[in-house]
Image (spheres, helix red, strand yellow):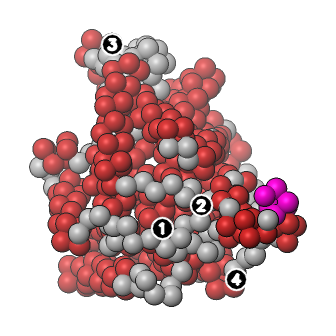
Amino acid sequence: MNSTASTSPDSSSAACAHPPVWQPVLLAALAGGMGWGIRGQYGHETGAMIAGLLVSLVLVFLLCPQASLLPAARAVAFGTIAMGIGGSMTYGQTIGLTQNAPLIGNWDAWRWGMLGLGIKGAIWIGFAGLFLGMGLGGVRYRSREILLLLLGMLALCAIGVWVLNSPHDPANKILPRIYFSASWQWQPTAGAELKPRPEVWGGQLFALLGAWAWAGWLRRDRLARNLALWGMLGGIGFPIGQCLQSFHAWNPEVFKAGLWVTLDPAMNWWNWMETTFGAVMGASLGLGLWFNRRHIGPMSDTTDAPLRPFIEWVLVGIHVTMLVISEFTEIRWANALYDPGLIIAFIPMVAVAGGRWWPFLLALPITAVPILGKTIQSLVYESHALGSVPGWLFYGALPLALTTTAAIWFARQLGRNLSGREYARRALLLAAWLYFGLNYAFFHFPWPWLKWTARTPNAIGFTVCVVGLTFACLTLGPYRPHAQGKSRNVADA
């Protein structure tokens, strides 16, 4: 009986860590808060991938101590890519319903805006929970399956937009029945300046539900099914964070007395909303994975990588080229083609599922490319904080060389002694300090001993996050399942 228990799937004590619950909750909150707060400077799908990367690395580091290198890297890459999918949803006007000056005091608009933020947040983080769970659940998803899944999700997205986000004809004041952006319902006297934006949350909802049903029931991936729900719960961080910002907008008198007289002018409330959203999101994913840790698969070593290296590198070239063109040029066809989150995720998801190089390249240099470009754009060409040569060198060439070298080194450790946990630890240290440093430069180095600006409080918050993550990486050792849990598995067997 004992030998049977030691090899049965249920005794996945072999693959399941048991750290105290506060560790994945707190550290994923630090990673998510810093990652999503940094996203505020870089925006949209590619910016959100920072938070996906940091949170995924934290959770693999803490809860997958015996994972092999390639499965761990694939799980991290899946979580990173998926966090970007929801960036296609517009939400600026939804936030406006809760704080724009003409709507201050309108509780119906406030509640409707908060409902919209909750729905959009749930969809956004639901994708991350689903695909991170798919990477960790022990079910092997092959590149062909991922290809067909994404095609199905694109079809469902089109249907969802047609069902829930249509019609959209602002010229004739015709908007969808369920609409969470600026509309004449809340501002009936507004004119052409209103500019209601097209929404796609309905399409993304259909795509998420379709993928959730496929992975959770057809593929019987219980972790993916459960973690998607925890991700959707984490979406409540969006309205929670906006509660802070809308309170500031609705109650200006509170911030004209006491400490706030000095502090309020230096507070970027929008960025604190984003940081709060990220922290709640990370904590929810951390708590959800901790509760479902027994469903983490063995994540044992595998040599299954059907994509040949040549094909992988060709796909890298295509994806990065399209990413750069769509982010930094005004070429309309490229912007239209590579704007939706599901389209941006298409090549990376398929290549990560079938490749040996892509999981590492995606997590490090590919995720960094648009962030490096936007940092250079801001510091060199917009604010002229430094010249083009040092700007391209320090914020482009050197970080790209570092991340690419690290990714190649990690990939070359396949079949050697490097574990998935050690990969997550080292990649987390590199990524956390890279994005913290880039963002600090983007903030024009708001050292706390200098005169405070609107960047200083957020920079202090991000410093606390990166120091906490660094301390965890340097001090936390491997965990062993409780002996009581082991005996219970043996008895069940």
Provide residue 82's location: percent of width, then percent of height.
Answer: 43, 52
Mark 2 neighbour class, 10 Å CA radius: few under 14, some 14 to 19, many 20 or more:
many
Query: Disc 1 marks which residue?
Result: 71
Which of disc 2 and disc 1 is earlier in sequence?
1
Q: CA distance from mark 2 to mark 3?
A: 49 Å
Assign the N terminus to one quadrant of the image: bottom right
Whether residue 347 is situated above or below residue 313 in the rendered picture: above
The secondary element bearing badge 4 is classed as loop
Does residue 283 appear to the left or right of 238 in the view shown? right
Does residue 389 appear to the left or right of 286 in the view shown? left
Q: Nearer the viewer, mark 2 or mark 3?
A: 2
Q: Amino acid at mark 3?
A: Ile
Q: CA distance from mark 1 to mark 2?
A: 10 Å
Query: Disc 2 marks which residue?
Result: 297
Q: Amino acid at mark 1?
A: Pro
Q: Quadrant of residue 225?
A: top right
Instruction: Say if mark 1 contacts mark 2, CB within 8 Å.
Output: yes
The secondary element bearing badge 1 is classed as helix
Query: Disc 4 marks which residue?
Result: 477
Provide residue 166's location: percent of width, then percent of height.
Answer: 34, 19
Q: Say the numbered circle drawn on residue 174.
A: 3
Which of disc 4 and disc 2 is earlier in sequence?
2
